Image (tube, coloured by chain):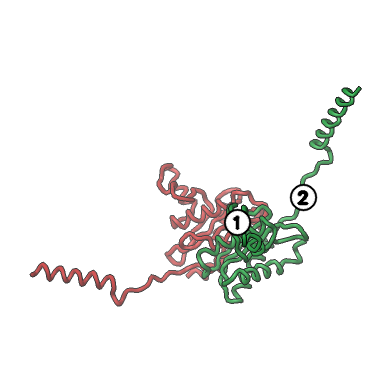
Chain colours: A red, B green
């Protein structure tokens, strides 16, 4: 009898969790195309002004490509590389250069075996407060640090809108 | 005599072949390509044109070799639109005609060989970007309710830069 009562109570609790009237949808913030385009174009133009021809990718929360831009006279690999850097940054919620540092001592790190992950500097996560909602990746400058500076310029451009 | 003639003929042919291969007048090919800035203007204009018409679309601009120059996904566009706009653009560049025209051409022939090439799609919404008679790229749009409406936005993108396409 007691057992049955406890069981019923547990069942009621489970049901209330599953179908509670207070259950809510998850609210998330998402990059809009104008903001994503602004980040991408600013990154590309910043590098161009410094004499570096780069390609840029801006990806969204699920790694989907929002903006892809191939710069003039860029190397053929820069499109793929900028996308993979961005995806790496989104996945780890870190600058891709920091991920590269983290795995440099563990060449068998599982993360390196995931699709399209790449330990190369040049991408930064795009954050709304503490939440990572996307990433911007740059490839083509002579050095990942220079790629990253352009990625940063892109994010800085829309800093007021990332809240 | 006839043998000498034949030898002379062989020598001449050899000399000619070498001459063609190593001529001092040999020149690199030269052509005009879309710049990143022009490609961007085409894409942003196309996406804005559709937005104004009430349609959320994705857009791709590809270059002379079918390479992606610009890809833009509207935040409210359907999941498949990004891929579709790219395939339409690639199709248009490949056949140097509107992707809708290609769709018409293969419409009655489900086993048309072209349809078995990678990334070719029989769907309206992309237009070749031309300088005169020369195709230097294409713009593809996907997301409007109908390829004809996609194509109108692609056309708006090209029209925006028509003064620079020369």
**Can the viewer see residue B124?**
yes
> What residue is at 57 percent from the left and 72 percent from the top?
B145
Q: Which mark is residue B30?
A: 2
Quadrant (top left, top right, bottom left, bottom right) of the N terminus of chain A: bottom left
Direction from residue B32 to residue B71 in the image, left or right: left
The disc, 2 or 1, on the residue closer to the chain's N-terminal end is: 2
Mark 1, chain letter? B
Residue B142 in which image quadrant: bottom right
Looking at the image, which is closer to me, B22 or B111? Answer: B111
Q: Residues within 10 Å of mark 2 (few under 14, many from 20)?
A: few
Q: Looking at the image, which is closer to me, B26 or A46?
A: B26
Q: Which mark is residue B120?
A: 1
Label 1: which secondary element: loop
In the image, taking residue A100 as reference, residue A139 lies left or right, namely right
The residue most toward the right is B1
The answer to whether B35 appears left or right of A144 in the picture is right
Give the answer, above or below, for where A107 lies relative to B127. Answer: above
């Amino acid at each position: 009898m007691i057992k049955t009562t406890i069981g019923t109570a547990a069942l009621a609790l489970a049901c209330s969790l599953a179908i509670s009237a207070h259950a809510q949808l998850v609210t998330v913030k998402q990059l809009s195309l104008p903001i994503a385009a602004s980040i991408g174009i600013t990154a590309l133009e910043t590098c161009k002004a410094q004499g570096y021809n780069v390609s840029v990718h801006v990806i969204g929360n699920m790694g989907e490509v929002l903006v892809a831009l191939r710069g003039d006279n860029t190397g053929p690999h820069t499109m793929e590389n900028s996308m993979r850097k961005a995806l790496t940054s989104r996945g780890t919620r870190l600058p891709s250069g920091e991920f590269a540092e983290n795995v440099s001592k563990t060449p068998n790190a599982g993360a390196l075996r995931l699709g399209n992950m790449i330990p190369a500097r040049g991408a930064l996560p795009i954050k709304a407060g503490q939440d990572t909602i996307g990433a911007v990746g740059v490839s083509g400058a002579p050095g990942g640090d220079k790629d990253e500076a352009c990625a940063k310029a892109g994010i800085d451009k829309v800093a007021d809108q990332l809240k | 005599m006839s043998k000498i003639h034949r030898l002379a003929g062989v020598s001449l042919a050899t000399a000619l072949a070498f001459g063609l291969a190593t001529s001092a007048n040999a020149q690199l090919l030269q052509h005009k390509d879309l710049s990143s800035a022009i490609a961007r203007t085409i894409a942003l204009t196309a996406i804005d044109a559709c937005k104004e018409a009430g349609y959320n679309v994705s857009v791709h601009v590809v270059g002379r070799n079918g390479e992606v120059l610009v890809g833009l996904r509207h935040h409210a566009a359907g999941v498949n639109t990004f891929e579709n706009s790219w395939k339409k653009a690639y199709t248009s560049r490949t056949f140097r005609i509107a992707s809708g025209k290609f769709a018409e051409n293969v419409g009655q022939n489900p086993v048309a060989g072209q349809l078995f090439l990678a990334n070719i799609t029989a769907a309206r919404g992309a237009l070749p970007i031309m300088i005169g008679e020369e195709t230097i790229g294409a713009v593809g749009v996907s997301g409007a309710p109908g390829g004809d409406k996609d194509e109108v936005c692609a056309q708006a993108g090209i029209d925006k830069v028509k003064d620079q396409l020369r």
